[in-house]
Amino acid sequence: MKVEQFKIDESNHQHKNEHQRKFDYVAADVANLDEVLQKLAAFNITIPSWALGTGGTRFGRFSGGGEPRSLEEKIEDVGVIHALNRSSDSVSLHIPWDIPENAASIKALAAQVGLRFDAVNSNTFQDQKDQQLSYKFGSLHHVDKAVRKQAVEHNIQVIKYGVELGSNALSVWLSDGSNFPGQLNFRKAFQNTLESLKEIYEALPDDWKVWVEYKPYEPNFYSTTIGDWGQSLLLANKLGAKASTLVDLGHHLPNTNIEQIVALLLMEGKLAGFHFNDSKYGDDDLTVGSINPYQLYLIFNELVEGMDARGMNHAKDLGWMIDASHNVKDPVEDLLQSVEAIKIAYAQALIVDRAALLEAQNNNDVVRAQEIIQEAYRTDVRPLVAEARLRQGGALKPVEAYRQLAVREELIKERGSKTVATGL
Amino acid sequence: MKVEQFKIDESNHQHKNEHQRKFDYVAADVANLDEVLQKLAAFNITIPSWALGTGGTRFGRFSGGGEPRSLEEKIEDVGVIHALNRSSDSVSLHIPWDIPENAASIKALAAQVGLRFDAVNSNTFQDQKDQQLSYKFGSLHHVDKAVRKQAVEHNIQVIKYGVELGSNALSVWLSDGSNFPGQLNFRKAFQNTLESLKEIYEALPDDWKVWVEYKPYEPNFYSTTIGDWGQSLLLANKLGAKASTLVDLGHHLPNTNIEQIVALLLMEGKLAGFHFNDSKYGDDDLTVGSINPYQLYLIFNELVEGMDARGMNHAKDLGWMIDASHNVKDPVEDLLQSVEAIKIAYAQALIVDRAALLEAQNNNDVVRAQEIIQEAYRTDVRPLVAEARLRQGGALKPVEAYRQLAVREELIKERGSKTVATGL
Amino acid sequence: MKVEQFKIDESNHQHKNEHQRKFDYVAADVANLDEVLQKLAAFNITIPSWALGTGGTRFGRFSGGGEPRSLEEKIEDVGVIHALNRSSDSVSLHIPWDIPENAASIKALAAQVGLRFDAVNSNTFQDQKDQQLSYKFGSLHHVDKAVRKQAVEHNIQVIKYGVELGSNALSVWLSDGSNFPGQLNFRKAFQNTLESLKEIYEALPDDWKVWVEYKPYEPNFYSTTIGDWGQSLLLANKLGAKASTLVDLGHHLPNTNIEQIVALLLMEGKLAGFHFNDSKYGDDDLTVGSINPYQLYLIFNELVEGMDARGMNHAKDLGWMIDASHNVKDPVEDLLQSVEAIKIAYAQALIVDRAALLEAQNNNDVVRAQEIIQEAYRTDVRPLVAEARLRQGGALKPVEAYRQLAVREELIKERGSKTVATGL
Amino acid sequence: MKVEQFKIDESNHQHKNEHQRKFDYVAADVANLDEVLQKLAAFNITIPSWALGTGGTRFGRFSGGGEPRSLEEKIEDVGVIHALNRSSDSVSLHIPWDIPENAASIKALAAQVGLRFDAVNSNTFQDQKDQQLSYKFGSLHHVDKAVRKQAVEHNIQVIKYGVELGSNALSVWLSDGSNFPGQLNFRKAFQNTLESLKEIYEALPDDWKVWVEYKPYEPNFYSTTIGDWGQSLLLANKLGAKASTLVDLGHHLPNTNIEQIVALLLMEGKLAGFHFNDSKYGDDDLTVGSINPYQLYLIFNELVEGMDARGMNHAKDLGWMIDASHNVKDPVEDLLQSVEAIKIAYAQALIVDRAALLEAQNNNDVVRAQEIIQEAYRTDVRPLVAEARLRQGGALKPVEAYRQLAVREELIKERGSKTVATGL
């Protein structure tokens, strides 16, 4: 299944005039229009290989049809997304769910639909068939050196797969933690984790990074050994320059000011990037921007200001990835909505009047600062995002085009209506 | 596998003197000793059939060995628990995980180990093989009348199973809800739920009750159609006298004052009973009393005061059940710990100096009220709980006895080390 | 200080062309334009008399200049707000902070600036000088009947003041609660509150309502006797048709789905109205729409749908009031921002494609439902709100006009730079 | 007002036999009895000078009688507490609420009742009369260098007061933050704070420490510039060896695992000490141990294990202080209850079977680990705490003795019934 360009063009044709009217209207008020459009065009968000199938909870999973049955089919699906939105030019693999048996052919396949491979992800939160030692009580933090060793070796293996695919970062999420007071010695667990990460760090190629993710709870419900940004940063600082902290938007306690954390990690040069999603209660893994789009915008506001202050390249100097679970939506549609929400937030952040904001801040003019921040947010920037997409050959309305082109129906025809993709 | 009485007696023998010393010490200060011991002896907590196997999360499940492979084996396990603690004289079945093909023989089997059947539980949060319509978008609240009908009929079927087993209550937990703003019309969802519950209510035998459980989130992450006690009570009041509200301790937003809710439901005559567990973050389903034992005690403090005010029988007039997930513990040990924690909290509540507390409250003597409340809590009542158990033939130290008697090893021998029980 | 119409017109003149261009653009896509503009014009939000001064916290208060020193000056300030935004045509008084010594003259004064009097508010959360009995341990829930009587009489007195002013609702917020486990008997506290409210209810004139507010904590930090919507609704149902539940957006536990509560209260015919503000942590009393504008919109989405389903008049059938604290902003500017945020959310809710949404919901088309909900939200409706204001003589840009006209400077000149308004 | 020893002895006399019976019973099971008693005897908790008066909230304050009107009277009150509990041998002053005009005479006065001076506290969260520049928009983080300078100089002044009194630590709590998105540049605020703290750090005498407190919100409700332990640690590490992180138990987001933070700060050698209190919702500043005593115990469990691992002196190597607000209790009684709760938690932590726990942890025997942890917690250690107090001349039952000796009545007679102490 491949979405052909002419079909996208056809789809765009019907919306052309309407789009032009809207774009002209919004563009008239954007001082730095070309720059905004260029930045939007350059900004891509990685699709994780496990997000192409229907997700579930511990209470069950309601699979949809036409889910990818192999790594090849997952790449096919990301290809569809990228063809439609021109903003998802890479895939992030999860080992062992997506072991690339033949890296060269997988790379070639991906290249055919314009994709490259972003960070690779290890998995020590589940036991695999024929695995020697269990991760029931953790992996890199385990009291038993042998388990730690097994987990370290798995991570090194993942790096190897990544090297073959052209990746240059290892993303580590540890579920290691405890369910009950007394179960764990926090200090030793931290130190074991550090020791294990050091061994993995040593195995990193020169141009590689390791991203240390944090999460306060789930699947452990009393403590998590890398539980917050402070713990992740502590580890990253002890590891060295190649290590940094990965922020998953759903991995925070209620009411956390995430944008402040983002600003400080950027300040420290230790922000690795993002796993995007949205949530109301915990790690709900909902569509990006579906619950609190203003928070997403405030995060991008910090990113734009902070990256510019450090002279960073928005598109390339951080990792941008979606990490969500699609329990009740078609995964492809969900991902298209997520990417759109991210780019809208990014566009809003790009048009903030920074000089005026700085002045308001320096005068403690709180009312004015809010007006400036909300002026950009309340602006309907969708035509800007659509224009950038259009110029790259994408669809003006990706979700609508996906439906018109009956992609899912086609996939079901090819793959069947009862397929189940690997993943959560 | 059955734990024979003489083995328990042997185990007790070694602790006898030590226990007697401790009991005498504590008993000396308990004014209403006989009453306390009688109430403790009469107080049983139901074991749910799905709690005998290792639980898991969406990230995985690490099964233990010797898990029950059938309803018969689950009853066997509850029999072990009850033999040891003499406080778990009933089982709560979950349909369709535990369909009793031959009710008479199952009842007989249970009776052999001193067990009866408590509330039966329906399941419309998962799709079963060969199920005609899907519950992906809900069951009793569904926009499609046909799905609602299917779910209603399932509940009526569950009642029938329950009648055969001698149960007299249907426990309904609905996962119905929505993941995204806009997905659901809250009002219509509520009204559909009410309509469906009315049909189920009509099918209740005369001496039956229906318990309406509430939960704020999971597996739906934007809204749950029966999301809090207010919504459950609204439904229960519209349904009638047989309907009441079931409180699961883990089903509350952060910082909720659960004991106040309990007191008010009791006041209204609408408290059905409890699903006991403990939690730090959400519906963590941890061992009762492992995270916040003081809260558990405060709840029992309200229960004792409130039930006495209404002249209720502590043991019989509410439903008492554990509902937990045993991800890293032997389920039987976990359940023994949970029951112990409940009985400790109950014992503490029984020895509160109610007359003094009332006087302090009437004088707004907040310091004194706290002293009275904490006096009972800080008392080490374990010897009281143990004595009540001992008098009924239970083990002085249930967990220790379970290990000494090598029950799990025996179960693994019988059932194998790779069994997986039905359930979450 | 009065803002003269010609000055507003002058201010508007400079923005006229720009506004017209924007309005024409947005209006082109609004099917029900006239209806939307009429509804926006009719929609007013009451200003509470205590919101005209700088607020504070227990850690201190940093007063601004030119704060109103009397009820007359407060009315003057609301007059300024209403002149600018044409959306704040009423004041809500707080007794005893604003006792109207001469009701007739106060009414006349208010009428001069186009204002009427909305709900009156009682205060039993503070002790007043020369008050006989203390509210340290509560008021309507107090263990001492004499204290309850005093509090009941105060509320009746407040009703009398309200009658003279032309109000027709009493708004009751009780801080009654407890700080420590054991301090209070929850059941008796509830029953005392009910008894007290019944006495107040009896004193209500025929065409009056009583609005029962709820709040989970602060200033009491263990329990609040009317702590959540379920408790308020229970009371309102026991009181009768004149009693209903008032929703303050900041009075919820973390992660509460407020829009669902709103929908259900509407369904029950028991929603009194709103105290608007925004918050990130607790009852932060921040500017409306400054923290989570999407949530505000989702609430209005329920309101529009639910009120229409009951054939209610949006503007008149519920109470709409701001209740915020202005710790670091000029209170008038803060209120102008709050009213603007409310009207933006309302406008967005008015343009939701309800037929399409209903269809998507009936098809469980979750992706489409989200698209529809977000289509309205992402639309920049500010020109619609501005147009409605313009047509009524208000300022196109109220905050900007307020600054250009140097209102605050004028007030400081009149009142001094060290005034402190009554209130929190 | 001074509590004479013979009166305490008289009070103890009536409880002597009862105490002996209880002590003998508990002591029989404590292997390291002498060590436990010695450690309990050596363990003191500082009383902050602002905690001797009734506290309040933004909604009001209900003062009690006999509150201290001066620093001298505050010391008198702490003297009473220490005479009764022999566990509060120091005072922590707050500048400018308690400026010691004549340090020598204040020191002498304190010494007479066995007190010394612990950490001194600066205050830049309020404006003082005649203060040149306002802290409305912060102090050490302020955009204006002049305000920062003023705040730095205030802190240096506080150090000077402290030196005269024999203190050796400066405790810094900054309320600096923002109420609205856009108000603040997080990075610059952090960097300004760091710069200011460096200047203060430079002014520290050789043997002094600076303790950097964190708090997520209140009095600012969008961001706090030192908002969590990670931010405080980042600052402490950049400052140097004299700087460390102070933990106030109420300064955390909902559900935070505080004991893990404590363990990691200890591991890093960067834990300064504690401000003890308890809370259910936010910074509620309730009596220690009144809401979640198990959490308090778990924290002490980490402290004992972690300090022992580093060879630290429990009593001396960290700062132990109460920081609470006494809104509805007699402050002296509240403080006596708080100190008792702390010592109970400490005693429980001292009797944990560490060898057995270590073994259980190394075996991943989660059930056993919980049994061990709860064995100590469920033990009624009050007789141990009382014995340690008794041996030092304190009261067996401090609160009861305080009432019997009619201390408050005496204070009211001396000071009047309408006094109001400085503080919150």
Image (tube, coloured by chain):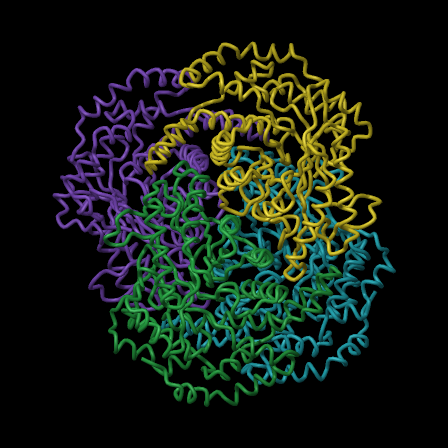
Chain colours: A green, B purple, C cyan, D yellow
- Give the percent coordinates (x, y) of residue B85: 27, 30
Which residue is pictured at 43% across the width and 42% down the height? B262
Q: Position of residue A18 (x, y in %)?
A: 52, 87
- Counting labels gives 0
Q: From the viewer's perspective, is C64 left or right of B226?
A: right
- The correct choice, above or below, for A377 with respect to D200 in the image is below
Q: Could you say which quadrant of the image residue A88 lies in?
A: bottom left
Above/below status of C327 relative to B13: below
Say whether residue C32 is visible. yes
Residue B186 visible from this viewpoint: no
Of the 4 image quadrants, the one containing the N terminus of chain C is: bottom right
In the rendered view, does B188 fall on the left or right side of A312?
left
In the image as oriented, which residue stretches furthest toward the front? A206
Work out which residue is located at the far right of the displayed protein and give it. Answer: C413
- Front-lying residue, C378 or B298: C378
Viewer-closest of A152 and A185 = A152
Residue C49 placed where, x, y %? Answer: 72, 56
The foreground one among C157 and C235 is C235
Q: Residue B114: which quarter of the image?
A: top left
Identify the residue at image location x=63%, y=47%.
D238
Percent x, y of residue A124: 35, 52
Q: Decide: is B165 above or below D41.
A: below
